[in-house]
Image (cartoon, rainbow, N blue to C red):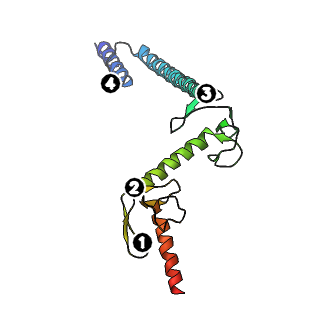
């Protein structure tokens, strides 16, 4: 009887210890659980490494696709400027800018004798910004040096502000329109003459 009780205690303790090794989970076999857990962890680790490798392969292939898209905009590509002008890429400079003309141009910002798409786009964007700023002046009221109040009717390409479409003695360049700049210059010159 003592042997049966002792054997029962040993068996009971074995089951308790087996339960502790399995993290509190109940299991019928304590020897097969531990190796299965470590094999599972190794398998999960391999799956994770494979997922990382697959992700990096995907990123590399997407990067290649982006490079291919950039190459598609390389030599021979037709690009559209901000003003809607279509131009053809003749060659690519070492800095990555795309040459669209081998002739000198006012839009050739760095004066290197070639016009790039980037230079033309920047020039057109700058002119749009300047025109928007200039157009904001139409309708504004200005005061001449003699205190006369005048209104801006339109802006000339040179930036002068037209205040009258009629001929005037103050029309310095005799183009048939009077600008605020011409009237101000005339009034300042007359003031200087009167001061002498």
Res 77 label = 3
Circle 4/circle 1 CB separation < 8 Å: no
User: In this picture, is 144 found above or below 44?
Assistant: below
Circle 1/circle 3 CB separation < 8 Å: no
Q: Earlier in the sequence, mark 4 or mark 1?
A: 4
Q: Identify residue for label 4.
A: 24
Res 144 label = 1
- Say which element carries label 4: loop
Q: Earlier in the sequence, mark 3 or mark 4?
A: 4
Q: Earlier in the sequence, mark 2 or mark 3?
A: 3
User: In this picture, is 70 found above or below 125?
Assistant: above
Q: CA distance from mark 3 to mark 4?
A: 68 Å
| Residue 5 image position (x, y, % from top left) | 29, 16
Residue drawn at point x = 69 percent, y = 33 percent = 91
| Residue 59 image position (x, y, % from top left) | 54, 27
| Residue 10 image position (x, y, % from top left) | 35, 18
Q: Earlier in the sequence, mark 4 or mark 2?
A: 4
């Amino acid at each position: 009887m003592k042997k049966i009780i002792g054997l029962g205690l040993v068996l009971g303790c074995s089951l308790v210890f087996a339960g502790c090794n399995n993290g509190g989970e109940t299991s019928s076999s304590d020897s097969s659980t531990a190796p299965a857990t470590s094999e599972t962890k190794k398998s999960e680790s391999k799956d994770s490494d494979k997922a990382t490798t697959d992700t990096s392969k995907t990123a590399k292939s997407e990067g290649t696709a982006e490079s291919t898209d950039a190459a598609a905009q390389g030599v021979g590509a037709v690009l559209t400027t901000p003003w809607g002008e279509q131009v053809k890429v003749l060659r690519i400079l070492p800095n990555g800018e795309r040459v669209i003309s081998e002739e000198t141009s006012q839009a050739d910002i760095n004066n290197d004798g070639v016009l790039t798409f980037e230079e033309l786009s920047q020039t057109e964007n700058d002119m749009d910004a300047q025109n928007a700023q200039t157009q904001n002046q139409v309708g504004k009221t200005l005061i001449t040096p003699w205190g006369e109040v005048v209104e801006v009717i339109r802006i000339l390409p040179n930036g002068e502000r037209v205040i009258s479409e009629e001929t005037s003695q103050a029309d310095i360049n005799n183009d048939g329109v009077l600008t605020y700049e011409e009237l101000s210059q005339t009034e300042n010159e007359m003031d200087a003459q009167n001061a002498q």
